[in-house]
Image: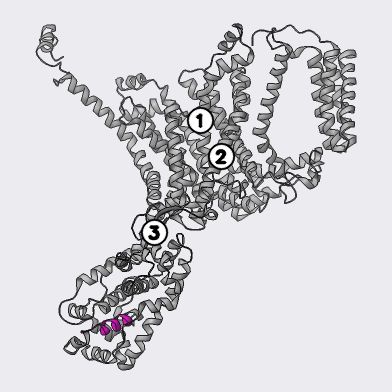
């Protein structure tokens, strides 16, 4: 947004009602929690209206001091009312309203918008952002929530009163201890760690070769071949699992390590194909011709010229294949036997029978792992685009 | 050109085809180079293609095969099926004596191989009660034989002796190899194991002509004992069925006269048996005695209907229909569940797809219109769930939604919900829809985002400057251009949703489960593999249709992962 609107302070008749409305809204919740909805609404609105008048009127020049003051005051009020947790909530309220009051009263909220917007359009603009924010909260909350719960000192799947009071006694590492000492979980982890890399290796080797073949200019039946190679991603897992269960028991692979590895490799292949062909789309063929021209044989050309350039794509395809196998449960439930019980399988049984919050500890570890993988893939993608001479998005 | 001179090149061009450096016509040379290129490309693809065909396509084909395969009836009761062919169930009469005789010998072998209960279970899918009928009859089969065995042994003790009987059945002279081979083939089909190899017995042709049923029953016994139990037939006492067969043969008119002139080994034993003069076994009465249901026409109709090697029965079952003697018909109201399950799967997948559009569209729009740096930061919030383990997200939703869960706790704490009236959001459709919308949302946002990125923001401004309101500009200008993204995302989400198993299994309870959960149930618990395979085949057909649509709209090559 290049067009900026000059900032000019807004009248009190604008920001006081808006802040009061927001305060009333927050007051409803605080009030209901204490058993007096209407009182909360009125008190919240009145309190915030007063604060808004004070901050934006008397302290309009000393924004920093005003915001800090509100922050500390609210935190203290929250602390006296509801202990440590209340203090934190109060501090958050204070921070938000401090920012909100100055944002409105100084007119900064219009700064990044085009000048010709009507007030209704401005309102819609921010309402839309709030809606999007709510969707982001929906996306991320479930993943965030499991983290504190995994430190629960009790064997519950819920927050205990001690945890809500931030009492150190309410937290413990016992579920992590359980994960690292319990032989069931350790076996499952070991199985996952032996199956996933083998499956990844298989899918990356076959997948990369095929992707290179597919990106040649003249491939007969390209569409049909592509459709077959991508199909493991599209066919519902339960159908793949059922088919593999029938077929692998016929040929004696059901319940074996090799059977599970082959099944997982098949499931990971589409991801390798997709990422590697995407990398090869921008590949400059004159480079290989230049190499051949200078006397390199096809093998040398592949390893010295083509491979380094498509390596980022290969690695991220491999990571996809790895996570597919590492995270897969339906197929291994059918194709594997007790000897191939993987981590997701163990989690699945745990969830069905709700044994212990150790699952949440495992979940937290897995989230950390996925953050790591996400970062790696993102870095690789940018590197690949830079190598191919595109500006990284 | 071979020659450097211009004139000769012109000459060549005028007189014949243009030549490549080695003298072959250029056209041919290019075609060869192209062929080489194609071959090289195919050689690179071939290993993977073979790998996928073996590890993935073959299993799917196997599943499809299982959904129509129905050899169990004809392998377990081969002779019964043959004799039953002429029977007409519409007359309301149970089959005749010959069918029951064939059933007796078939069942005897099947019971020894413990295959009759499998057949009982299979037929029980079609006609309730057959399973217990088969199990019960399998236990009683020995009784009929014992009734004959005792008088025979009384007459000549050696008739109960394995070695003596073996000698009697082996006879002298040429052996009846046709009988032995057909027995081997039948038992192979029954047990699924190879019956080839030495068995230490060959039925004598003469004795086989004299006592056809006994020879067949003894051959069953000999092959089974040698190949399955791994014992020598001569060391083991014959099955009871052999004595029933012997009684049957002896009671057949003319046999006793022929025995008088028989001189082979064990002729005196045979004479002693003939002197017992047993009555003809009444197989029908025997089975009626075991269970009256054997005279029930419905049971026999079921056996006859499912006699062919391939059946559409599983597919009919999967759409709540069944085979009856008068053709196909709908099942009773209380037995219809699959159509309802398919409808529910469709409906819930549609709801999930729709909520994904509803939630994904604003987010994708925001991401596409924010400055690159901010958009990339917010993109992490979309990609993190995408990369997080499915089970982690499902367990998170279990934690969030259950009655003592986070959402209910917060609502109670805020006073919006009474502590005693906590919302039930899990183990029902709502739970499945919420959790799956969350899990599949990134699959909607990513294609939408990549389409929206290509829509120039100037179009919207142009529309507005031409006098369109915000809404008109969006609805008439922006929205139509984003439809390919909605299409791609919707099909992807719908395909993924329709076959989901894990999440409905954990948060779906009984009302929020999908057809996949039923497939899994049939394969791992009820062991009705054929029905599971048929349900799977129908689901697969639906998914492949959508896959084809996706290919037409988006193109498989354009599938993108992680933005």
Whether labels 2 and 1 share one chain = yes
* A125 to the left or right of A61: left
Q: Earlier in the sequence, mark 3 or mark 2?
A: 3
Chain for disc number 3: B
Chain for disc number 1: B
Residue at image location 53% in from the left, 40% down from the top: B346
Judging depth in this view, the residue of A151 and B497 nearest the camera is B497
Quarter of the picture containing the N terminus of chain A is top right
Q: Earlier in the sequence, mark 2 or mark 1?
A: 2
Secondary structure of residue under mark 2: helix
Identify the residue position indicated by label 3 in the image: B325
- Is residue B344 in the magenta section? no
Within the image, what quadrant is residue B112 found in? Answer: bottom left
Quarter of the picture containing the C terminus of chain A is top right
Secondary structure of residue under mark 1: loop
Identify the residue position indicated by label 1 in the image: B561
Within the image, what quadrant is residue B457 found in? Answer: top right
Whether labels 3 and 2 share one chain = yes
Identify the residue position indicated by label 2 in the image: B347
Secondary structure of residue under mark 3: loop
Pinpoint residue B115: horizontal percent, then vertical percent.
Answer: 40, 67
* B159 to the left or right of B486: left
Visible residue check, residue B146: yes
């Amino acid at each position: 947004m290049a067009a900026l609107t000059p900032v000019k302070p807004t009248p009190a008749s604008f920001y006081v009602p808006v802040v009061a409305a927001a305060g009333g809204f927050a007051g409803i919740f605080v009030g209901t929690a204490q058993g007096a909805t209407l009182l909360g609404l009125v008190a919240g609105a009145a309190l915030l209206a007063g604060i808004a008048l004070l901050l934006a009127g008397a302290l309009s020049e000393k924004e920093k001091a005003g915001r800090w003051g509100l922050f500390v005051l609210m935190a203290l009020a929250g602390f006296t009312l509801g202990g440590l947790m209340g203090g934190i909530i109060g501090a958050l309220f204070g921070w938000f309203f401090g920012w909100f009051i100055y944002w409105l009263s100084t007119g900064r909220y219009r700064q990044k918008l085009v000048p010709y917007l009507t007030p209704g359009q401005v309102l819609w603009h921010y309402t839309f952002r709030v809606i999007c924010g709510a969707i982001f909260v929906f996306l991320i909350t479930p993943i965030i929530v499991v983290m504190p719960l995994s430190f629960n000192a009790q064997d519950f799947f819920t927050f205990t009163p001690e945890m809500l009071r931030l009492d150190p006694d309410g937290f413990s590492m016992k579920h992590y201890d359980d994960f690292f000492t319990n032989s069931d979980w350790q076996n499952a982890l070991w199985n996952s760690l032996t199956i996933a890399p083998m499956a990844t290796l298989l899918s990356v080797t076959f997948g990369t070769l095929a992707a290179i073949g597919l990106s040649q200019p003249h491939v007969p039946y390209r569409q049909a071949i592509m459709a077959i190679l991508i199909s493991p991603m599209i066919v519902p897992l339960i159908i793949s699992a059922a088919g593999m269960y029938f077929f692998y028991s016929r040929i004696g692979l059901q319940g074996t390590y090799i059977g599970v590895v082959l099944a997982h490799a098949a499931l990971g292949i589409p991801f390798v194909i997709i990422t590697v062909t995407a990398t090869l789309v921008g590949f400059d063929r004159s480079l290989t011709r230049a190499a051949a021209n200078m006397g390199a044989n096809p093998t040398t050309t592949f390893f010295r010229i083509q491979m380094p350039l498509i390596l980022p794509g290969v690695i991220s395809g491999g990571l996809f294949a790895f996570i597919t196998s590492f995270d897969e449960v339906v197929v291994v439930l059918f194709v594997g036997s007790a000897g191939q019980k993987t981590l997701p399988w163990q989690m699945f049984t745990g969830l069905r029978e709700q044994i212990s919050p150790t699952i949440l500890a495992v979940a937290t570890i897995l989230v950390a792992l996925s953050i790591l993988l996400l970062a790696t893939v993102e870095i690789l993608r940018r590197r690949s685009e830079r190598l191919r001479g595109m500006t990284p998005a | 050109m071979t020659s450097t001179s211009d004139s000769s090149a012109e000459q060549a061009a005028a007189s014949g085809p243009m030549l490549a450096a080695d003298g072959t016509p250029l056209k041919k040379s290019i075609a060869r180079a192209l062929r080489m290129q194609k071959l090289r490309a195919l050689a690179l693809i071939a290993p993977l293609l073979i790998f996928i065909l073996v590890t993935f396509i073959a299993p799917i084909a196997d599943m499809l095969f299982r959904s129509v395969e129905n050899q169990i009836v004809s392998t377990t009761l081969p002779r019964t099926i043959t004799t039953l062919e002429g029977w007409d169930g519409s007359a309301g009469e149970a089959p005749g004596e010959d069918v029951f005789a064939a059933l007796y010998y078939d069942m005897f072998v099947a019971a020894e191989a413990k295959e009759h209960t499998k057949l009982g279970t299979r037929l029980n899918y079609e006609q309730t009660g057959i399973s217990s009928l088969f199990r019960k009859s399998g236990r009683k089969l020995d009784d009929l034989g014992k009734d004959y065995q005792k008088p025979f042994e009384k007459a000549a003790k050696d008739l109960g002796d394995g070695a003596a009987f073996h000698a009697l059945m082996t006879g002298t002279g040429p052996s009846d190899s046709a009988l032995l081979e057909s027995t081997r083939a039948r038992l192979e089909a029954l047990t699924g194991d190879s019956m080839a190899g030495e068995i230490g017995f060959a039925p004598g042709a003469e004795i086989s002509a004299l006592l056809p049923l006994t020879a067949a029953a003894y051959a069953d016994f000999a092959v089974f004992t040698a190949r399955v139990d791994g014992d020598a037939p001569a060391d083991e006492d014959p099955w009871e069925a052999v004595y029933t067969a012997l009684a049957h043969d002896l009671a057949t008119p003319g046999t006793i006269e022929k025995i008088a002139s028989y001189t082979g080994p064990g002729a005196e034993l045979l004479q002693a048996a003939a002197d017992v003069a047993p009555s003809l076994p009444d197989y029908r009465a025997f089975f009626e005695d075991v269970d009256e249901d054997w005279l029930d026409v419905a049971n026999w109709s079921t056996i006859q209907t499912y006699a062919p090697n391939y059946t559409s029965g599983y597919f009919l079952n999967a759409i709540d229909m069944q085979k009856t003697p008068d053709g196909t018909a709908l099942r009773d109201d209380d037995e219809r569940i699959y159509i309802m399950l398919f409808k529910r799967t469709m409906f819930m997948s549609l709801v999930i797809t729709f909520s994904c559009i509803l939630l994904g569209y604003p987010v994708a729009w925001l991401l596409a219109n924010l400055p690159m740096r901010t958009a990339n930061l917010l993109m992490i919030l979309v990609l993190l769930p995408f990369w997080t383990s499915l089970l982690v997200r499902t367990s998170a939703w279990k934690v969030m939604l259950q009655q003592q869960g986070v959402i209910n706790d917060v609502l109670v704490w805020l006073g919006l919900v009474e502590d005693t009236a906590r919302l039930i959001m899990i183990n029902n459709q709502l739970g499945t829809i919420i959790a799956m919308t969350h899990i599949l949302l990134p699959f909607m946002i990513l294609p939408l985002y990549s389409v929206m990125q290509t829509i120039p923001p100037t179009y919207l401004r142009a529309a507005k400057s031409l006098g369109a309101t915000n809404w008109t500009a969006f609805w008439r200008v922006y929205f139509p251009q984003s439809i390919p993204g909605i299409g791609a995302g919707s099909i992807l989400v719908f395909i993924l949703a329709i076959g989901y198993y894990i999440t409905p299994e954990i948060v779906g309870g009984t009302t929020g489960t999908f057809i996949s959960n039923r497939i899994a149930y049939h394969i791992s618990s009820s062991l009705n593999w054929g029905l599971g395979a048929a349900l799977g085949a129908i689901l697969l057909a639906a998914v492949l249709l959508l896959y084809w649509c996706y290919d037409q709209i988006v193109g498989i090559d354009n599938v993108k992962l992680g933005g």
